[in-house]
Image: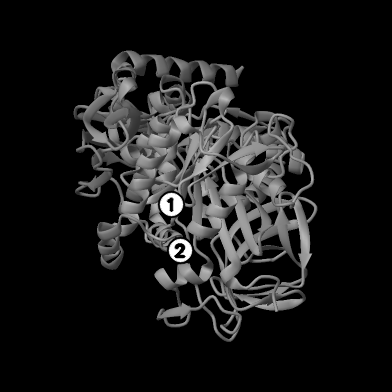
Amino acid sequence: MLNFTVEKIRNVAVIAHGGAGKTSLVEAMLFDSGSIDRLGNVDGGTATTDFEPEEIERKISISSAIAFCDWKGYRINLIDTPGFINFLEDTRGCLRAVDGAVVIVSAISGVKAETQKIWQCASDFELPRIVFINKMDKEAANFSRAFGEIEKAFGIEALALQLPVGSGDSFRGIVNLINMKAYKFANGKEEEMDIPSEMAPEVEEYRKILVEKIAEADDILLEKYLEGGSLSGEEIVRGIKEGSLTKRFVPVICGTGIKNFGIYSLLETVILCLPSPVETAGISPIKGKNPKGGSVIERKPSEADPFSAYVFKTIADPYAGRLSIFRVYSGVLTADSSTLNATTGAKERIGQVFYIMGKKQIPAQKLGPGELGVVAKLKETFTGDTLSDESNPIVFEKVKFADPIISYAIEPKSKGDEDKVSMSLHRILEEDPTLRFHRDEETKEMLLSGMGQVHLEVTIERLKRKFGVEVLMKTPKVPYRETVKVSAKAHGKYKKQSGGRGQYGDCHIAIEPLPRGGGYEFVDKIVGGAIPRQYIPAVEKGVVETMHEGVIAGYPLVDLKVTLFDGSYHSVDSSEMAFKIAGSMALKKAVQDAKPILLEPIMKVEVITPDDTLGTVIGDLNSKRGRVQGVEPQAGGNQKITALVPMYEMLTYANQLHSLTSGRGLYSMEFSHYEELPSHLTHKIIAEREAQKKDKSE
């Protein structure tokens, strides 16, 4: 038998915006349950789930971390997730592996844009949630205001299970609206006390709402309530659980993680209001596909079913190798066994299996349904892969991560380290599916793309710490394009005599602009053998190579029709090379006479901003040569701005938006089209490219 039956397991993500107090809350839960014997803290760098050097330095969660605690016979697996906007995709990936979530809302700042985004992520996975109003001990803490924002921002009925006794410095306890008892906080514990008399009207009001909400969901209970005005404690508890699991309302409790107030009640609420793997499967069955035929297969969270697990996170450890963190959905995984990666078809050897407590790994002989664990050194298994019984394969749907929104060029500090940079970055990419790394053939730069500047800075720091590779990060080059505005003709003649056989190629071409996005077209109108057939492809080759290299500023030439209509040749001296050069010469001359211009990439940008910064954000977009296409109201007092903005203006927008909205704004962007670059900027770029050429030649 396993240590805990499946019914006694709770897999819970703790989610919120950055700075809401997730890590401190998880630390308090671990301490109060006896999982750790010392209460760590974020400021001191001693928190169990913030252990990476980059997290300790910045005092924010950068990567999700797993821990567990045992409470009254239940195993609660906790995932402390990032809330900073750059790292929310890591949070999304972990939500795939849990059955419920604790959403933290600050009693001071209320619901933020990131909170709404994370709430939506949890909704995408259909997770039951409870809300913990945190920081009740802080000055200006306001339970009623935060409670009101929950319903308004999340669009769901909120049901208070507790009320705070006092706030700020006077916050000293809670009133439990389920059993109608009050508890004061003393020495990390909750001791029963009398309900303060001045709170009696408020308590009665909230208690009445609680009972009514429970009664409304059941005709029998409603009739009983209308007749007698009360429900039994057992009926209330059952109604709270049912309403939470079906997401008819979200239970709300309160406390403060950093002072360890209200944590006992939180643990009790997690067990009551969030589902076990069995309850989750009862609402939404565990389904996957047979990799051999694509038919849908169902699994039960039972030891008797074939083994299946989903890898939701990967850690690249330079010493232990690749660490694969997974959730078991069915069956049992034992140490020293083998399994099938059903996603790739590869067989994997399982050595030791472990539970996870922050950065510590605790050996386990086997892991069963609903459990979270880690295994090292799987050769061909990555985030999103499914491990399963070899004779009963199943593949679970992968989480689709968002595309990166910002790119920077990187180069090694030490020359000749390009290969080392590439190899090390690919190891980092194994643990972070939101990163992209490639070499731009056009600009010859190594480009690292991610979810924001801080995301990329952290990646660079990890690269140095884990693999000893140092790189410089700089703004990438914008992929401008060249084109022409009018038609033109030109003559290209290449003639070279240096003793013996010479070189001779002669061609006449006409060029004309194509519609934007028209690409390239080459037309052969040679008649009468003015140029022999075998040399015409050489002319086109010279044209194409020159278009790729660019004419006025070194950017690819696009949207161009080239017509070869005349020329001449020499029976002895003509060659493919000569006609290739002649074609190149002709194109360069023609472009200069065809009013050449530069095109810049335009991005379609969507910005979510609070109402109070809408004007500021629109003004900033206008100053970036952006064109606002529309503004739509969003839930929670936010607005969505849609705009078209040049890529150049958006290269560092993540930092600017953070500053403009005090961290409450979000944005995404994708390529839209190319447009003509204003002439004064064109002249500036051409001058810069000429200066670069001069520097290289010297």
Could you say which disc has been placed on residue 131 in the image? Answer: none
Query: Which residue does the numbered mark 1 point to in the structure image?
Result: 122
The color scheme shown is: one colour
- Seen from the viewer's position, the closer of residues 445 and 348 is 348
- Seen from the viewer's position, the closer of residues 652 and 215 is 215
Hey, which residue is sitting farthest bottom in the picture? 391
- Seen from the viewer's position, the closer of residues 690 and 157 is 157
Along the horizontal axis of the image, is 98 left or right of 461? left
Q: CB of mark 1 within 8 Å of CB of mark 2?
A: no
The amino acid type of the residue labelled 2 equals Glu
Picture quadrant of residue 673: top left
Picture quadrant of residue 27: top right
Q: Residue at x 29, y 18 (%)?
A: 615
Mark 1 and mark 2: Cα distance apart in space: 29 Å
Along the horizontal axis of the image, is 547 left or right of 25? left
- Seen from the viewer's position, the closer of residues 378 and 5 is 5
Q: Residues within 10 Å of mark 1 (few under 14, many from 20)?
A: many
The relative height of residue 663 versus residue 339 in the rendered view (above or below) is above
The relative height of residue 266 versus residue 7 in the rendered view (above or below) is above
> In which quadrant is the C terminus drawn?
top right
Query: Which residue does the numbered mark 2 point to in the structure image?
Result: 234
The relative height of residue 299 versus residue 68 in the rendered view (above or below) is below
How far from the left and from the top, in percent, is residue 366?
72, 73
